[in-house]
Amino acid sequence: MARAPVIIGISGASGAPIAVRVLEAAHAAGTPVALVISGGARAVLREESGLEPAALERFAQTVYADDDLAAPIASGSRASSGMAIVPCSSNTAAKVALGLADTLITRAAHVHLKERRKLVLVPRETPLSPILLEHLTRLAQLGVVVLPPEPAYYLHPKSVEAITDYLAGKVLDQLEVPHHLYTGWKAPER
Ligand SMILES: Cc1cc2nc3c(=O)[nH]c(=O)nc-3n(C[C@H](O)[C@H](O)[C@H](O)COP(=O)(O)O)c2cc1C
């Protein structure tokens, strides 16, 4: 049977290039993606990647507007293979932690919580405020994978692109999407 789509929500935190790599690699792996881009993310995507949101649509099987609360993925009756919000703004993390669901991204995240499906958030903010830490702690306690976009310096990345690939690969690992974005740690010969 064909795999149900993974849902990728892009919100307006810094880190849009990570989302772009996630989409490209999922597409290359033949994984169907349902894509939602928030209003905030549109501005950040243009700023950080120089891309128009429409340029990402070719990597997705379906694309929904963030205000389309009647979209199939707003309901638990629509199967999915998990969801990632990458990057995840403090605004979106707060809404998900509090059960607010006034956008399609936050509604679909709420569906993943209530249906006990895989939900991955990539929060990007520095420093982290006590409020955001409280929200992320609550989400982690609910089973959400909180995956901050932190580089692995022990892999000696040679470029920002290598760091971005690593982070995108970590998201795809959680969604069980195969990829070749990074090679894991190999201990030196002793
Ligand atoms: C260039 C730019 C970078 C931003 N970076 C962040 C960020 O790293 N983290 C964050 O939480 N918000 C960031 N914001 C603010 C969010 O975009 C803003 O709070 C927005 O309302 C989030 O909406 P959304 O959660 O619906 O995407 C950034 C905004 C801009 C324009």
Image: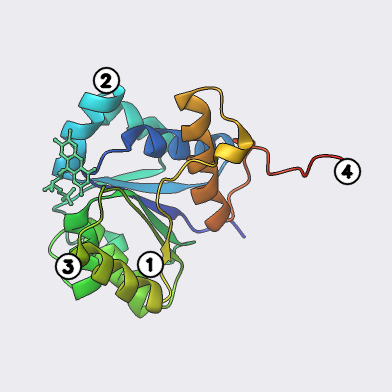
The residue lying at 59 percent from left, 35 percent from top is 181
**In this rendering, position of residue 9 left or right of residue 2:** left
Q: Is residue 159 left or right of residue 18?
A: right
Q: In what quadrant does ligand 1 lie?
A: top left
> x, y percentage for residue 72?
29, 61
First reached walking from the N terminus: tag 3 or tag 2 = 2
Q: Which residue is mark 4?
A: 190
Give the Cα distance between marks 3 and 2: 29 Å
Residue at (15% x, 70% y) in the render: 100
Which residue is disc 3 drawn over? 101
Instruction: Please give the count of numbered marks on the rendered protein.
Output: 4
Q: Earlier in the sequence, mark 1 or mark 3?
A: 1
Q: In terms of secondary structure, where does tag 2 sit?
A: loop
Q: Amino acid at mark 2?
A: Gly
Q: Earlier in the sequence, mark 1 or mark 2?
A: 2
Q: What residue type is disc 4 on?
A: Arg
Q: Could you give the CA–CA distance between mark 3 and mark 4, rounded to whole angstroms?
A: 53 Å
The x and y percentages for residue 96 are 24, 67
Whether 103 is drawn above or below 154: the answer is below
Tag shown at residue 35:
none
Q: Which residue is mark 2?
A: 50
Q: CA distance from mark 4 to mark 1?
A: 51 Å
In front: 106, or 132? 132
Asked if marks 1 and 3 touch (Cβ < 8 Å), the reply is no
Amino acid type at mark 3: Ala
Label 1, ligand 1: CB separation under 8 Å:
no
Can residue 29 be seen from the camera position used here? no
CA gap, disc 1 to disc 2?
Answer: 33 Å
> What residue would you read off at disc 1?
78
At horizontal 57% and vertical 41% (from top left) the residue drawn is: 30
